[in-house]
Amino acid sequence: MFLISEVQVIISLNIYGDKQLPKSKLKKMEYLYTNKLINSTSPYLLQHAHNPVNWNPWSAEIVEQAKTENKLLLVSIGYAACHWCHVMEHESFEDEQVAKIMNDNYVCVKVDREERPDVDHYYMTAVQLMGQQGGWPLNIIAMPDGRPIWGGTYFPKMSWMKNLVAIADFCRNNPAQTEEYAVSLQNGIEQASLIKTSENVLPVHSGILENGVARWKQTFDMENGGRKGAPKFPMPVNLDFLLYYGFIKADENVLEYVGTTLLKMARGGIYDQVGGGFARYSVDEVWKVPHFEKMLYDNGQLLSIYSKGFQQFGNREFKTVVYETVDFIERELRDPSGAFYSSLDADSEGEEGKFYVWNVAELKEILKKDFELFSLYFNVNKKGFWEKGNSILLRETSDETFAENHNLTLEQLQVKVADWKNILLESRSKRVRPGLDDKTLISWNALVIQGLVDAADAFKEKRFLDLALGNAGFIKNNVVQPNGKLFHSWKNGKSSIDGFLEDYAITVQAFISLFEVTGDEQWLHLSEKLTDYCFTHFYDEESGLFYFSEKGVNSVVTNHFQKEDNVIPASNSVMAKNLHKLYLIMGKPEYLNVAKRMLNPVASQFSNYPMAYANWGAFILKITSPFFEVAILGDNAETVLKELQTGFHPDIMFVFAKSESEIPILKNRMVPGKTLIYVCKEGVCQLPVETAKQALEIMN
């Protein structure tokens, strides 16, 4: 840690809560400068293409340039919807004085963390090993070969300049000491990236889950939902596991917590009450003030959890959230090709949230005589007030209660609310829109496919399934290569960046789900092809896990095994669940053996840190609790499927066929003139029955 103590210029800032910095409006630049980012497809990189900083996109060649010029690397990582990334750009990267210091002393590299999660993980690990708080923008100084030696998040202009000068001088004057630190930190990164094969291998049993959930409950905010305190993130991976766990274990406390979280989020400012869709997180503990960026990955997963929440709780508000969120994704994030874009910025006209908030004067002008009732419904009052005379729309009660309190029928209120939303949506469409990140990331698109499939299952809505099939068709036709290789990013007809394990794992998950709901075997065969590619190019026999990036590829950054769930589930946890499903469908025991072995390094972690292993917990539930496979064959198979899929059934996998099939779970089970239902458990099936009622009786 000597660089930090020697330089004595590091300032640690909380990137989430500091509101003291001025929010200057964007100024149109004359484009006096154009750097090498100009040919990028990433909107985030293009935002910096006219900075006076001599930015380079990330590539292996950049290391050779740094070695040739004998300069340190300066790697700055962010993403298009990141508010504080914009602040630092306007304060520092657009400033000629700052740019001169950067250009004179460093080879400067800009990275879109969404395009290069491998680079982001490598340098984020380094910053955390330095004892710093992680966040974005993430700014790293590295040796010419890419090994990090210093880093942090957001820095004000003067602090940034002092740091840059001091570190460059120190490294020039102390090359041996700098190299020593680089070696030490790199060793730490490599150790953090390894999996110890003997690491706490324990028999997997349900007690692991019960111990972990008991510890987890201590963090539950039973009044507001989410984790106690602020900020609050939706964390759909966690909610999905807890809903499954509460259902299987009949744990009313857990179910109440999930229901409360979903309800409070749906009524809060984190949810766009006018246009649908969720912001990334809330800065407070009551879901009121969002960090206004809207991310595709959040909304895709929240489609899933709200659909399942509706099946479990029957709450009409959850259905409204699903329909409005699908509308938002289709309206604002869908490319004509069927692809989905990545995000909407938090800022418009240089101000955070300006597109989404409202002041009293404009609401009175728009709503006329309905303003008073509207203001009560959406809390245009002290509760909803934010800043600068603006309010964030949010709700407190159910429509039933509100209607009763204001002498309206439920139907009358619902008509009014729909009219209000349409009027405000039309009015808002005339505002300057937030920036759109129009690149397409395959893993995020696959999350939306899964969300749409779950929504189609819950609401029997053909439009949702058609959207899912449209996006899956886009991936199949534009991104999947003949040998099963995937790319990570797509834009304007061009695929780029080799796929990471998350792209394969989440796409396989989505394609299996499409097979389950459509009976179309092409999605199953594509899933197998992608899985085979993963075994060849990502699987590590020694650890039993899959690497995040393809193995054997020369890279500046250290490869790693992604095993901790976060806002997006860990790619290895998704892969384990995929292999379990493929085992049940295809009857290949080797898939199950690999999936169970993948639990060895992580199962013991669930008890101590369940929030980071929630998706693994869902897999453990599947193999330690009753889990059924239901195969339906016959002319009326799809009708029977819909009869069986009423309610929440996380403990059942359904497959069907209307004609003869070679798929092992369906093979040789067709009887002409009949529709038969086979209820199976771990491949062992009961005698077939002919009605949904009989099948449910077997499972109950």
Image (tube, helix red, strand yellow):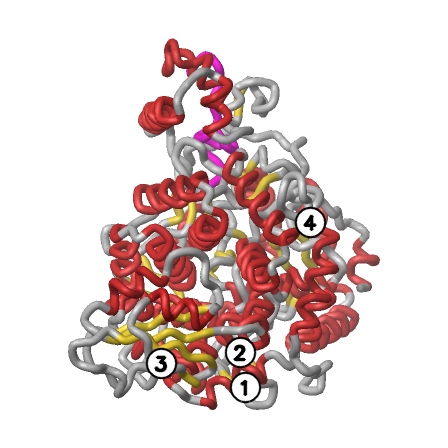
Q: Position of residue 655 (x, y in %)?
A: 33, 72
Evaluate if marks 3 and 2 touch, with contact meaning CB atoms under 8 Å apart.
Answer: no
Q: Quadrant of residue 505?
A: bottom left
Q: Residue at x 60, y 59 (%)?
A: 250
Q: CA distance from mark 4 to mark 3?
A: 39 Å
Vertical arrangement, residue 370 with respect to residue 246, above or below: above
Q: Position of residue 144 (x, y in %)?
A: 60, 69
Q: In the rendered structure, which amino acid carries the disc numbered 3?
A: Glu
* Horizontal side of residue 641 vs 223, given as left or right: left
Between tags 2 and 4, which lies in front?
4
Q: In the rendered structure, which amino acid carries the disc numbered 1?
A: Asp
Q: CA distance from mark 2 to mark 1?
A: 7 Å
Task: Find disc 3 in the rendering and name its residue.
Answer: 528
First along the sequence among labels 2 and 1: 1
- Let me know if residue 440 appears in the view: no
Task: Find disc 2 in the rendering and name its residue.
Answer: 547
Vertical arrangement, residue 183 with respect to residue 88, above or below: below
Q: In the rendered structure, which amino acid carries the disc numbered 4?
A: Phe
Span of residues in magenta: 344-362
First along the sequence among labels 3 and 2: 3
Task: Find disc 4 in the rendering and name its residue.
Answer: 220
Q: Position of residue 465 (x, y in %)?
A: 28, 56
| Residue nearest the observer in this picture, 527 or 5 | 527
Q: Residue at x 32, y 75 (%)?
A: 689
**Quadrant of the rendering where the N terminus is positioned:** bottom right
Q: Position of residue 22 (x, y in %)?
A: 61, 30
SS at badge 2: loop
* Horizontal side of residue 354 vs 384, given as left or right: left
Task: Find disc 1 in the rendering and name its residue.
Answer: 540
Vertical arrangement, residue 369 with respect to residue 158, above or below: above
| Residue nearest the observer in this picture, 388 or 37 | 388
